[in-house]
Amino acid sequence: MNLLDIVRRELKPEPWAEGEKIPWNDPAFSARMLPEHLREDRDAASRRAAIIARHVQWIHSHVLEGRPSRVLDLGCGPGLYDQRLAALGHVCTGIDFSPASIAYAREQAAASGANCTYILGDLRSTPFGPDGSYDLAMLIYGELNVFRRAEALAILTKAHRALAPGGRILLEPHTFEAVQSVGQGPSTWYSSHSGLFSERPHLMLYEPIWYAEQAIAVERYYVVDAETGAVTRHASSMLAYTNDDYRQLLTEAGFHDVRFYPSLMGEPDPSQAAFVVPVAIA
Ligand SMILES: C[S@@+](CC[C@H](N)C(=O)[O-])C[C@H]1O[C@@H](n2cnc3c(N)ncnc32)[C@H](O)[C@@H]1O
């Protein structure tokens, strides 16, 4: 692509048509993303360690009721939750399609002896394991919204089969309002000598679009190479759900007794108000 392609762009592209999501699974991008998971100055691709520790404590004591459990972490990133859950006596399996994150998670587990297994794979195509082999499946930090509804339903249905009867699903998707405010946000740009989207000097032109009828936010990222003018486009679409929509989705996937919590600490957390936490029984 070049600059003219930006000027001539479709103003309202079909959601998901210009790209599935930011390229988490691209090896070079995932290597640049890893420090974003591990940074401690702010919450980025993962949260800061102190927040994760509080989430894990709530998952352990409330969702798992302190019982040693088999945990399936979908979109586990570098395994920051699994590492801590394993230290509390749980056996964890994480699946993620980011090669740098999975390599880091495996190194950490090998170094600490944590009972964690990591699988490099796409949640849409990777088997989750034999039926009934987990007590908890989790998909947190907003990633559910980035899938088309049919894909989200297929992932949750597969998770349902992988859970033992009475097992739990723990989700942490975005609130409807959070997705809407992404889509209605301003277009912005920045320049960088080297950053997440390119290690070369570049401009990043960011454009969100809100589709009120479909309740979808599309985000476009145009990376303009500062030396050559070549343009690379990434796009990500997010579907907004109300709590009733989440309940419906989980029910269609086979779950029952859906309960909503205000955060992964079980209580309201103003810093995480963009998320809601449905928990349901398989
Ligand atoms: C926002 S990060 C959260 C990581 C981790 N759950 C945490 O909270 O620290 C989302 C993760 O989902 C993964 N992911 C997104 N889509 C995926 C897919 N289709 N298959 C596997 N992993 C995926 C990304 O690679 C990334 O590691």
Image (spheres, grey):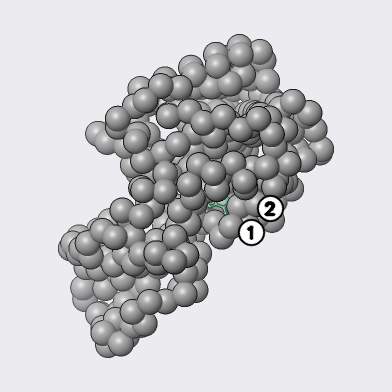
Which residue is depicted at the point 51% across and 31% down? 260
Nearer to the camera, 262 or 2: 262
In which quadrant of the rendered image does the C terminus lie?
Answer: top right
The answer to whether the residue bearing label 1 lies less than 8 angstroms from the nearest atom of ligand 1 is: no
Q: Is residue 41 left or right of residue 178?
A: left
Which residue is depicted at the point 65% across and 52% down? 153
Q: Quadrant of residue 180?
A: bottom left
Which residue is depicted at the point 37% across and 72% down? 233
* Neighbourhood count class around disc 1 (C-alpha, 10 Å): few under 14, some 14–19, many 20 upward: few
**Residue 235 image position (x, y, % from top left):** 41, 66
Position above or below: 152 against 88: below
* Neighbourhood count class around disc 2 (C-alpha, 10 Å): few under 14, some 14–19, many 20 upward: some
Which residue is depicted at the point 59% across and 41% down? 247
- Residue 108 visible here: no
Nearer to the camera, 226 or 107: 226
Taking the view exactly as shown, the residue that stands out farthest to the right is 131
Q: Is residue 8 left or right of residue 14?
A: left
Question: Element at badge 2?
Answer: helix
Q: Compute the Cα span from label 1 to label 2.
A: 6 Å
**Residue 183 image position (x, y, % from top left):** 33, 60
The reply to whether the C-beta atoms of the residues labelled 1 and 2 are less than 8 Å apart is yes
> Of the residues shown, which amino acid type is indicated by label 2?
Ala
Residue 150, label in figure: 1
> Of the residues shown, which amino acid type is indicated by label 1?
Ala
Position above or below: 178 against 43: below
Q: Quadrant of residue 142?
A: top left
Question: Element at badge 1?
Answer: helix
Q: Is residue 67 left or right of residue 204?
A: right
For disc 2, the marked residue is 154
